[in-house]
Amino acid sequence: MRANRKNGPPKELTPKIKKGDHSVNALTNGNLNYFRFMDRKEVRVLTTAHGPRHVATGKTNPVTKEAVIKLEAVHQYNQFMGAVDHSDQMVTNNAFKRRTLKWWKKAFFHMFMLGVLNAYIVHKATAARKLSHRIFRRDLAKQLVQFIPFCQEIRPAACPGQSSLFRLTARHFPRFILPKPGAKKQNPQRMCVVCSEPKKRTYTRYYCNSCDVGLHVDPCFEIYPTTKDFKRAHKRRHALME
């Protein structure tokens, strides 16, 4: 707990502890114990399950080579709750700093930062190339803001399901439209994709066997596989003939 926590023990009841001193200041109120212990910094603990006992952590001081001894309550807290503190620390260090009156915005960005942290944990566990949290967040931000054009599938009106490259390079042969077995129409027709307009459709008895579109033999079958914009080419040719 923090030293300035409301309703905490008065400072005069808990004298200062020097760094390196393993002594513990303790206060008791029924089953509730208050301990003050000096680690790298002063640590205050409220507990109902521990006494003022020191335990070995299994670690050694890299400088003095001595065994690291801590208060039992502090050691168990680090052992079982350390991951929670570490997660909160990583999220807090990169928290959304903009103040807002909308509570849901703060909740949203907190959940978003937790998602980023979870993604980083999964990345560390699965990726061959290890990244620091800062580098991972930087790369993630770049990927989120980079320009990705909206790729909408555009099918040429003249050739459904076929690209312009295929239309201009494939081999085209006219075929006569035959009636389907049992059909009422004995002379079936298809709309010509070259000379038909939205309000003025034209029909033909022939189609292209490669593109499966209706085409007049002359001149639409010549324009369709040789020009990229066959609609404009047909209008230009029609204007010259007039």
Image (cartoon, rainbow, N blue to C red):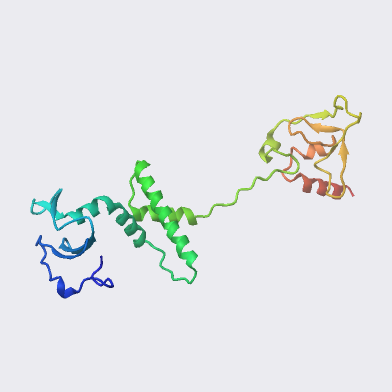
The answer to which quarter of the image holds residue 28 is: bottom left
Of the pair 20 and 236, the residue shown nearer to us:
20
Residue found 14% across the figure and 58% down from its top: 52
Q: Is residue 169 above or below residue 11?
A: above
Q: Horizontal and vertical percent for residue 121?
A: 36, 48
Q: Is residue 188 above or below residue 232?
A: above
Q: Horizontal and vertical percent for residue 187?
A: 91, 30
Whether residue 228 is visible here, answered yes or no, is yes
Of the pair 75 and 207, the residue shown nearer to us:
75
The answer to which quarter of the image holds residue 111 is: bottom left
Q: Is residue 116 above or below residue 1?
A: above
Of the pair 61 and 7, the residue shown nearer to us:
7
Residue found 48% across the figure and 72% down from its top: 101
What residue occupies the far front of the structure in this picture?
30
Residue found 34% across the figure and 53% down from its top: 133
Quadrant including the N terminus: bottom left
Left/right placement of residue 56 relative to residue 175 reads left
Q: Is residue 33 above or below residue 217?
A: below
Left/right placement of residue 56 relative to residue 76 reads left
Left/right placement of residue 186 relative to residue 104 reads right
